[in-house]
Image: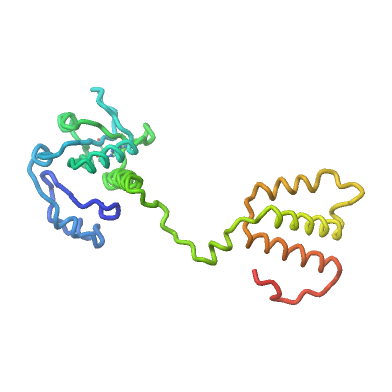
Amino acid sequence: MKNMGLSRLVLVDPLDFPSGDAVARASGATDVLEAAQVVGTLEEALVGCSLVLGTSARDRRIPWPLLDPRECGVAACEQSMQGGEVALVFGREYAGLTNEELQRCQFHVHIPSDPEFSSLNLAAAVQVLAYEVRMAWLAAQNKPTKTAKLETTAILNAQPVTADELESFYAHLEQALVEIGFLDPAKPRHLMSRLRRLYGRSGISKLEMNILRGILTETVKAARGEHHKQGETDV
Ligand code: SAH
């Protein structure tokens, strides 16, 4: 929960709480556990909630409005941004939620697991839904979901090559291929246009272009029997 930015845990009639095991497994997120509210019944837990989403590993006999985890994330997020309180209800590790408990929920959420083996561990199911809530929340806030920041040099290196740079690369490539005997200028076939298609598809960056040009230069030198100094290339 804490990983995904959720903090309000309500435990209904817990078997073991406070629990040494739970503290150990929380690996540092003990504030969530310490702040957990303990109640006797699901009814008490749901007081004040305007959207109640119940999770289940099984298809129930009674048809019920069903959401997938992604829709659940969006619905939970929308409701909470409108000021409503949302409950995601999870069941017991071994027995899940009873039909009666599930009927207290406006929507059911099922993680579309393999029907032959549909039940996730409780913690794994919580994580899937908490993650979907987080993704929906990040999207609603226009926050990025990719946090890697490119360094300036990395940005420069990732810059795509321009058409003119590509043209001079193709000229270099053709000259090198002739020189090493791979391309016969008398019988070029479609080699260069095929290579253009190949390189054109790969979205080459400026840095990668420099690597390719370096390889061509060294290939030609090697073909001419010219000596290559170790460490000459800096890529
Ligand atoms: N035998 C129980 C399994 C409980 S698994 C049953 O069939 O209901 C423990 C809890 O994890 C479930 O109550 C539910 O809250 C959640 N869970 C497990 N698998 C799930 C799935 N595929 N979709 C939604 N929730 C799931």
> Relative to the observer, which residue lies in front, 9 or 96?
9
List x then y, in percent, for residue 51: 19, 36
Q: Is residue 8 left or right of residue 114?
A: left
Q: Which residue lies furthest to the top in this view?
A: 62
> Relative to the observer, which residue lies in front, 166 or 185?
166
Q: Which residue lies furthest to the right in this view?
A: 186
List x then y, in percent, for residue 150: 48, 62
Q: Is residue 208 left or right of residue 139?
A: right
> Relative to the observer, which residue lies in front, 98 or 41?
41
In this rendering, the answer to whether 227 lies above or below 99 is: below
In this rendering, the answer to whether 100 lies above or below 46 is: above
Which quadrant of the frame does ligand 1 lie within? top left
Task: Name the residue: 30% across, 43% down.
Answer: 129
In this rendering, the answer to whether 89 lies above or below 151 is: above
How was this image coloured?
rainbow
List x then y, in percent, for residue 71: 32, 36
Task: Name the residue: 85% across, 44% down.
Answer: 189
Instruction: Tell me where residue 61 sits by quadrant.
Output: top left
Instruction: Tell me where residue 58 sits by quadrant.
Output: top left
> Relative to the observer, which residue lies in front, 188 or 123?
188
In this rendering, the answer to whether 1 lies above or below 227 is: above
The quarter of the image holding the C terminus is bottom right
Tell how many labels: 0
Task: Name the residue: 70% across, 61% down.
Answer: 212
Q: Is residue 74 left or right of residue 171?
A: left
List x then y, in percent, for residue 113: 37, 36
